Image: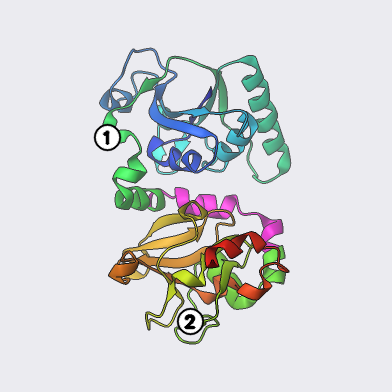
Amino acid sequence: MAKAIFAGGCFWCMVKPFHKYDGVEQVISGYTGGHTENPTYKEVCSETTGHLEAVEVTYDPSVITYEELLEIFWRQIDPTDGGGQFNDRGESYQPAIFYVDEAQREAAERSKAELDASGRFSRPVAVEIRPEKPFWPAEEYHQDYYKKNPFRYQMYSVGSGRAKFIKEAWKDQGKEKELKERLTPIQYKVTQENGTEPAFRNEYWDEERPGLYVDIVDGTPLFTSKDKFQSNCGWPSFAKPISEDKMEVELDTSHGMTRTEVRSASADSHLGHIFDDGPTELGGLRYCINSAALRFIPLEELDSAGYGEYKKHFE
């Protein structure tokens, strides 16, 4: 196993982005870069210790590379803001990359130069690249904060300005153009703009044929007809996905409601929401999914469509 250390502002927002990738074994929130031993959160916030809030990532280099971790890091921050991150200002929130050896230093310098030269930002990249210093784990209540306090985590991510910046600054212009050309307007609105199609006026709400439902964006298999049930809500309803690791769930506070959003892990498509009013005998959950986010492949067409391996779900 290897280690990588990144400071990207508030460490609450820097854990989940790494956790979701294969090869990442552990992400610890903590403090580093300063001159005091084992500092407390209160001491670090006083701006007298020299420490930055950071995360220590333990990873398997045979599964995910340091260069890939750098790409993940850049996309969680405003690389041009050296005075803090978003609403969090001051020394302890400054962004930095702490290298543990010469190879990491060279990779970080190279990655920073490439980002600078890309023209994505009008201002220069202001993230410092520093040698490793002792890393002190933060208090337990800070660890895996997004799991312990999902509502507050989501509100903080949005309220601080981080979520909006990431969405706007790091969007893939080429992908956006390609999807607008390939998807129908309602498919694009649902999957890329978190839209919702009309109830009872969508393609699969009453589809009863056996088959596979895949992500309309990248074709990832998501649900099977065996887990589909009629909920009379006007949208396709499923008791469970084929595999939970193909899904990402997010707290959704839009429209004055608090809901659990479902997104596809691979394509990051908005799919719909999860509710706890599903049939008890099927587990009690209802994955309420937009038809526009799905492509249905009938059972008899799985082989020709390249999904033959999923026929086992219907045996």
Q: What element carries label 2?
A: loop
Question: Label 1 crowding class (10 Å Cα cut-off): few <14, some 14-19, many 20+?
Answer: few
Query: Residues under labels 2 and 1: Cα distance?
Result: 43 Å
Q: Residue 287 versus residue 126: which sits nearer the camera?
A: 287
Residue 167 colored in magenta in the image = yes
Residue drawn at (30%, 69%) of the image: 281
Above or below, 64 relative to 33: below
| Residue carrying label 2 | 205
Type of residue at label 2?
Trp
- 188 lies left or right of 140: right
Question: Label 2 crowding class (10 Å Cα cut-off): few <14, some 14-19, many 20+?
Answer: many
Q: Residue 290 versus residue 10: which sits nearer the camera?
A: 290
Residue 9 in the image: state x and y as whole percent: 44, 35
Residue 309 falls in which quadrant of the image? bottom right
Residue 308 colored in magenta in the image = no
Q: Is mark 1 on a helix, strand or loop?
A: helix
Type of residue at label 1?
Tyr
Q: Is the magenta stretch mostly helix, strand or loop?
A: helix
Question: Nearer the viewer's eye, disc 2 or disc 1?
Answer: 2
User: How are the colours assigned in the image?
Assistant: rainbow
Above or below, 98 relative to 300: above
The numbered dot on residue 141 is: 1
Span highlighted in magenta in the image: 159-177
Residue 232 falls in which quadrant of the image? bottom left
